[in-house]
Image (cartoon, coloured by chain):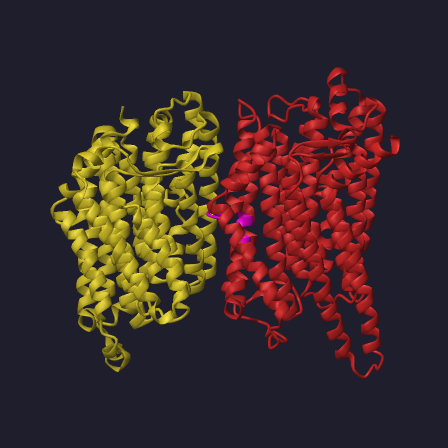
């Protein structure tokens, strides 16, 4: 049944092309909600024990002579990712409610991204997974290049080329696996023993390819420019789910296919991850554009995911999956505030300009949301970010104690830039020329809309729920991770 | 008695060449109709004060001629379907196998769509002759595909080539068309000379022109310098035909200058048939001299030669395409790169590799016909085919813009389009051909090439979707029926590319079964 998330989303994308542009957003919203509901129903109804292994839900021969199957499967990890995709999709559509220029195209590309993400998270065939993976990238180009803002064409092209640069390595890795094992089925490939010599060079090729999309340092530079250039919905999807595709596929494919290669290279992944966490946090501290701050914070938080994966123990990897969920929600929330709630009304994202606007009084709901999001982002206990990061660090402690110390310092930087952004954007000192607030007549008309409130509440509830009771996800993630091959 | 025997064999022959015969008869019929209506046009255009009447006459003549031509092509497809499954005549001069039948149909389908594009080419003043040439070129394609004998292949090549030279230079009012025709002719005839010389050397060494006999002979004799020369010369001739670097120099001018249907046919039908024949020659005829193109295990033979051609094509085609601002020229350089990818399957030399090559060539041809269809509409509306003429197309023509997305992304190899599956098939066949990943260097180069290619395809799409329209369409008021036909053609082709991407199995499995 959960396979219908894919079909419904693509069907919605096609259907809304037929109808007039005015109803496009309603169709998109219905489609996104349907996807989320399907995800939740599957989450509630599937017995936890079934989620411990990669359980086939659909398997149809596709191109028999080449051994390609239309094979979908689900386990605790992919179900978690499907859930965060659904949450991000609904809130993204809600935060794009005011798009009134080429709406059909906008929601068409948006739903293609969402559908492709569902597809990646549920694929159990390497060819299928790669097809969905590449399918996500081109719509992102159009979303950013047509509907974006600052330097959009440059940002869009950079993002697309980086993604396909990674895709090229992924393609090579998949071809090598296919040519060697003669199969594309993930469950079969996970039984196949690749020679250690092959693993030692095929793993870095494949993992690096995926990690580009996850924003690994030093191949992360597409992420901040892409986030800044993208429309709000684009940044939300990009940070919320698209970056997770890379981490998820790295875990699902690269680490499970080439476990020995992974063990040989894991310490280098950890090194890159830690550099990414600290470096991106330090860079974020010096940014003037609010979206750049959030963009670099995404890179920093994705560093935690990579560190969790590199720990190579069940705890750390489960934490990484939890962090994917958590950051998906938090990043979407942060971008929603910066891109939609603030930028639409103030027409600036410059922190210095924002600090003079006394926004906490003008837009109390936005301020409230941003405080919640910042707290979650900093890892305050009670929010999902804390639960995920603490699990990753405990996991990392077993393998790389030094990394934990450095990351601890990095977390101080994270807190520093988050607080700086929070204070500057909403709680700045009101100086002389505050008249702009009262004279700007649009503001009162443009109070926070219902759609924005719904979207923000959905995301806040998600981060709080998982933060207060992470077991609800961990119970499903951890057995699935423990069943994976690289732990044995 | 003798006459009776020869009669039956002629009847048999006529039955086996019925598709070709149908196309030839159609060509003659189209020529006649064109001549007759041209007389009428001249009469109508007697008073120079009324040129529109003449134009209308030409348009009507174009309509009739292309209708007859399309009908003939459809009948020929039906005739192909009624051929027996496996027969051969005259020691391989005419061979009928599932493979030849399949590719005759593909060539005829490509000819059909090209004919559909002719209807809206308004600058053609002699539609009858033009369509007759297309049909004769189609006969050339069918002879090429359906033969396993070097002399017959050469005749097919010449029939195809001579028709295409005239078609490339057909627009006498356009100096670019003349340039295209001349360049294509000079390069093409030189390449024919190479091929003929190579064939004669091979004949001298092996004593036969039949591919199977050559193969037997080659297996028994060691490689001699003269034989190597013959093989390389034959390959050079085909490298010209498929526009593989460094023999690609005619392609940009021919693609850019020739009338659009001519460029379409040069890029699609001619290329598919050339790949079929090239594959048959190297795999059947020169089979014993395969050699090895692996990185550490290079062995002399034709596959290292093709590997070098492929590598050069991928590099040169993709890098030069980056700098183009004219869409047709860009497509020409991308065609060079695609010839490189397509050669990968032949370099691999396996059954899988050949079938991947054929699949990719067929998909590429269909994509290119569609892309040229879009270019034709843009050209007739804005008067040019530079990138700036495409800006804002998404606003003016959402359908065509959507189709162009399909074509460009399929060329770039983005799922779920046919080009993606084709590339996956090709590259995996090349990688699997050799147990030790010998062709990994070539596959890596091809992957790098397709990564680079994404940039220029995205530039085209950026012009269509992102850029503000810089030019206003000159006369979009008259959306006549021919434009409608063109739109339908393009949409059908885009749908075919999407379907072949979602369900490649029908075509891929058929080709794989036919290649044995």
Q: Is residue B76 left or right of residue A303?
A: right
Q: What residue is rendered at 23% in x and 30% in y?
A: A482
Whether B415 is among the magenta residues is yes
Figure check: B390 above or below B264: below
Q: Which chain is red?
A: B
Query: Residue B71's quadrant in the figure?
Result: bottom right
Instruction: Indicate yes or no whether the magenta region holds residue B339.
Output: no
Q: Which chain is yellow?
A: A
Q: Residue furthest bottom?
A: B49
Looking at the image, which residue is at 30% across and 44% down?
A277
Residue B276 at x, y percent in the picture: 67, 38
- Image spot of residue A481 (x, y percent): 24, 33
Q: Is residue A192 left or right of residue B331?
A: left
Magenta part of the chain: B407-417
Q: Is residue A345 among the parts visible in the rendering? A: yes
* Residue B84: % across, % down: 66, 36
């Amino acid at each position: 049944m959960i396979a219908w998330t894919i079909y419904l989303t693509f069907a919605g994308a096609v259907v809304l092309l037929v109808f007039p542009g005015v109803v496009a957003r309603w169709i998109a919203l219905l489609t996104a909600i349907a996807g989320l509901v399907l995800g939740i129903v599957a989450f509630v109804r599937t017995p936890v024990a079934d989620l411990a292994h990669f359980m086939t839900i659909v398997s149809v021969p596709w191109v028999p002579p080449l051994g390609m199957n239309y094979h979908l499967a689900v386990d605790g990890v992919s179900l978690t990712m499907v859930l965060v995709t659904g949450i991000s999709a609904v809130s993204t559509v809600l935060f794009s409610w005011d798009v009134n220029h080429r709406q059909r195209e906008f929601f068409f590309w948006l739903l293609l991204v969402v559908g492709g993400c569902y597809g990646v998270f549920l694929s159990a065939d390497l060819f299928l997974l790669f097809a969905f993976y590449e399918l996500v990238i081109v719509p992102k180009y159009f979303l950013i290049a047509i509907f974006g803002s600052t330097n959009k064409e440059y940002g869009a092209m950079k993002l697309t080329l980086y993604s396909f640069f990674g895709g090229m390595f992924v393609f090579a890795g998949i071809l090598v696996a296919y040519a060697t094992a003669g199969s594309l089925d993930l469950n079969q490939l996970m039984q196949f023993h690749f020679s250690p010599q092959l693993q030692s060079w095929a793993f870095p090729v494949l993992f690096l390819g995926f990690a580009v999309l996850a924003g690994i340092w030093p191949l992360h530079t597409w992420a901040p420019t892409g986030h800044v250039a993208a429309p709000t919905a684009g940044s939300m999807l990009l940070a919320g789910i698209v970056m997770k595709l890379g981490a998820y596929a790295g875990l699902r494919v690269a680490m499970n296919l080439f476990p020995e290669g992974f063990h040989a290279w894991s310490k280098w992944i950890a090194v890159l991850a830690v550099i990414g966490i600290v470096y991106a946090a330090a860079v974020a501290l010096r940014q003037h554009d609010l979206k750049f701050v959030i963009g670099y914070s995404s890179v920093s938080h994705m560093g935690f995911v990579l560190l969790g994966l590199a720990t190579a123990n069940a705890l750390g990897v489960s934490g990484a999956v939890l962090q994917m969920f958590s950051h998906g929600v938090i990043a979407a929330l942060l971008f929603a505030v910066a891109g939609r709630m603030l930028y639409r009304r103030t027409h600036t994202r410059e922190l210095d300009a924002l600090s003079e606007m006394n926004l906490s009084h003008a837009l109390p709901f936005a301020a409230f949301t941003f405080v919640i999001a910042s707290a979650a982002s900093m890892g305050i206990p009670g929010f999902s970010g804390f639960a995920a990061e603490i699990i990753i660090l405990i996991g990392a402690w077993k393998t790389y104690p030094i990394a934990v110390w450095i990351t601890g310092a990095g977390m101080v930087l994270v807190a520093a830039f988050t607080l700086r952004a929070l204070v500057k954007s909403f709680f700045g000192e009101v100086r002389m020329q505050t008249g702009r607030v009262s004279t700007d007549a649009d503001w009162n008309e443009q109070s926070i809309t219902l759609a924005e409130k719904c979207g923000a509440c959905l995301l806040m509830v998600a981060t709080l729920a998982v933060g207060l009771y992470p077991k609800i996800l961990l119970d499903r993630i951890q057995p699935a991770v423990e069943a994976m091959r690289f732990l044995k | 008695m003798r006459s009776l025997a020869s009669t039956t064999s002629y009847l048999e022959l006529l039955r086996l060449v019925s598709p070709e015969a149908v196309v030839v008869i159609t060509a003659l019929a189209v020529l006649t109709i064109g001549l007759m209506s041209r007389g009428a046009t001249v009469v109508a255009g007697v008073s120079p004060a009324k040129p529109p009447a003449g134009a209308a006459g030409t348009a009507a003549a174009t309509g009739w001629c292309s209708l007859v031509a399309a009908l003939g092509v459809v009948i020929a497809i039906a005739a192909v379907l009624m051929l027996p499954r496996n027969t051969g005549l005259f020691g391989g001069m005419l061979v009928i196998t599932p493979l030849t039948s399949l590719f005759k149909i593909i060539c005829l389908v490509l000819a059909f769509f090209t004919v559909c594009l002719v209807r809206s080419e308004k600058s053609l003043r002699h539609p009858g002759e033009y369509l007759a040439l297309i049909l004769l070129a189609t006969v050339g394609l069918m002879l090429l595909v359906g033969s396993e004998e070097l002399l017959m292949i050469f005749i097919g090549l010449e029939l195809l080539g001579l028709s295409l030279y005239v078609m490339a230079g057909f627009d006498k009012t356009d100096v670019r068309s003349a340039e295209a025709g001349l360049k294509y002719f000079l390069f093409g005839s030189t390449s024919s000379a190479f091929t003929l010389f190579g064939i004669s050397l091979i004949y001298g060494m092996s004593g036969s022109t039949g591919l199977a006999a050559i193969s037997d002979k080659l297996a028994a004799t060691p490689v001699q310098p003269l034989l190597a020369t013959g093989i390389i010369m034959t390959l050079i001739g085909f490298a010209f035909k498929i526009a593989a670097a460094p023999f690609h120099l005619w392609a940009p001018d021919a693609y850019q200058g020739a009338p659009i249907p001519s460029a379409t046919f040069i890029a699609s039908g001619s290329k598919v048939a050339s790949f079929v024949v090239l594959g048959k020659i190297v795999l059947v005829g020169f089979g014993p001299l395969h050699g090895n193109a692996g990185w550490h295990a290079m062995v002399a033979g034709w596959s290292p030669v093709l590997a070098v051609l492929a590598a050069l094509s991928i590099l040169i085609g993709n890098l030069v395409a980056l700098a183009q601002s004219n869409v047709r020229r860009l497509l020409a350089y991308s065609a060079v790169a695609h010839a490189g990818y397509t050669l990968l399957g032949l370099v691999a030399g396996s059954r899988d590799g050949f079938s991947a090559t054929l699949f990719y060539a067929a998909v590429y041809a269909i994509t290119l016909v569609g892309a040229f269809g879009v270019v034709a509409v843009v050209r007739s509306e804005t008067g040019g085919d530079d990138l700036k003429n495409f800006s804002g197309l998404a606003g003016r023509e959402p359908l065509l813009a959507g189709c162009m997305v399909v074509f460009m992304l399929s060329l770039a190899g983005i799922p779920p389009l046919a080009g993606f599956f084709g590339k996956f098939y090709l590259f995996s066949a090349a990688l699997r051909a050799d147990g030790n990943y010998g062709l990994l260097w070539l596959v890596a180069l091809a992957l790098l090439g397709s990564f680079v290619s994404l940039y220029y395809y995205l530039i085209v799409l950026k012009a269509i979707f992102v850029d503000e329209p810089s030019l206003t369409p000159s006369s979009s008021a008259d959306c006549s029926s021919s434009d409608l036909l063109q739109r339908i053609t393009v949409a059908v082709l885009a749908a075919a590319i999407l379907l072949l991407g979602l369900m490649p199995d029908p075509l891929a499995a058929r080709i794989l079964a036919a290649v044995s």
